[in-house]
Image (cartoon, rainbow, N blue to C red):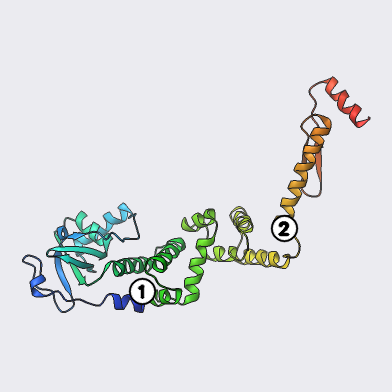
Amino acid sequence: MSKKIALGRGLKSLLEDTPASESESIGTTPPASNSGMSEILLSDIEVNPFQPRQYFDQEALKELSESIKVHGIIQPLTVRRLGPNSYQLISGERRFQASKLAGLKSVPAYVRQANDQQMLEMALIENIQRENLNPIEVALSYQRLISECNLNQEELGERVGKNRSTVTNYLRLLKLPPDIQIALRDNILSMGHARAILGAETPDRQIYLFKRIINEDLSVRKVEEMVRKMHDNRGGKSEQDTSSSANREITQLQSKLSSHFGTKVAINSDGKRGEIKIPFVSVEDLNRILDILKV
C-alpha cells in the first residue's frame, strides 16, 4: 500500500469543503453532493495564476492522459467559484492539462471558498507536498509563504506539517552562493552536503568546499570534518586562506623578477618544491640575463 502524504493542519483548515448549492450546478450537471464535489466542464475552468510551478514535463503529461483515458480521473481537482459557470483551478493542474489531452469534456472537482491569499497559500502548500521537488524549490516555496502570505516560521511549520527547525534549514539554503543553489536544484549536490557547506562562514569558503566536493567526490562526513577544522583554525589560517596567500606571494614575486630581468618570469610551485623559468629570445638576450646574474 502506498504511503499517503499527511497535510499540515493549516492546509486542512484552508480546504474546508464548501458544498455547492443546487442553483450553482453547472448546466445539466447534477447538484453538488455534501462532499462539495461536482462534475465541471473543462471549458468553465481557468488555470491558477498563483501556480508555483511553471514547467510541466510533456512526456509525463502524455502518460497521465493515457491513464486518464483508461481509468478516468481518480483524484478530483480542486477549484474555487468565480461566478456562474466560471471556476479557477486551486490544485490539480497536471490532471487538468492531461484531461484536456485525453479529450475529456468535464472533470470531477471539489468546489472551495478561497480568497487570493488562500489561493496562493493552497497552491504553494500543495506544491511543497509533491515528492519530486528539489530542496531549492521547497525553500523558495517556503520563502513565498512567509513573504507573500505574511506567515512567520512557526506558522509556516504548522501549515506544512513540519517543525520550525526543518523550515529554518530549508530557508538557509537560499543564503548559499548561486552556483551552489543551482547544483542543489539540479541534483548535483545533496541536501546533506549543502547543510554541511552552510557551516562555513563566508561565501568564499563555501565555494571552496563546493569545488572540493565536486572534484573529489567528498562524503558529507568529510565536509563536516573540513568545516570543523575551519572553525578550529579561526584564529589562524584555513587551508584555503593559506593557499590563497601563497598564490598572491608567488604572483608578486613573479612581477618583481620580471621587472628585474626585463622578461616575463614564471614560477611554478606545489607549495614545497618548484622552479623559476627565465626565457630569452637570443644569445645576446641570454648574455644580458647572465650579466644581471653576474654569472
Answer left or right for 188 relative to 81: right
**Residue underneath mark 2:** 239
The CA distance from mark 1 to mark 2 is 45 Å
Which amino acid does the dot numbered 1 rest on? Answer: Ile
**Residue underneath mark 1:** 5
Residue placed at 38% from the left, 75% from the top?
159
Answer left or right for 286 relative to 213: right
Residue placed at 80% from the left, 26% from the top?
280
Pick out the residue farthest to the left.
28
Residue 40, position in %: x, y?
Answer: 14, 65
In the rendered image, which quarter contains the N terminus? bottom left
Q: As rendered, which of 161 and 57 lies closer to the eye? A: 161
Q: Earlier in the sequence, mark 1 or mark 2?
A: 1
Residue placed at 26% from the left, 59% from the top?
64
Can you say whether 210 is above or below 255 in the image? Answer: below
Residue placed at 60% from the left, 55% from the top?
207
Residue 202, position in %: x, y?
Answer: 62, 60
Contact, CB < 8 Å: mark 1 with mark 2? Answer: no
Residue 246, position in %: x, y?
Answer: 76, 49
Tag count: 2
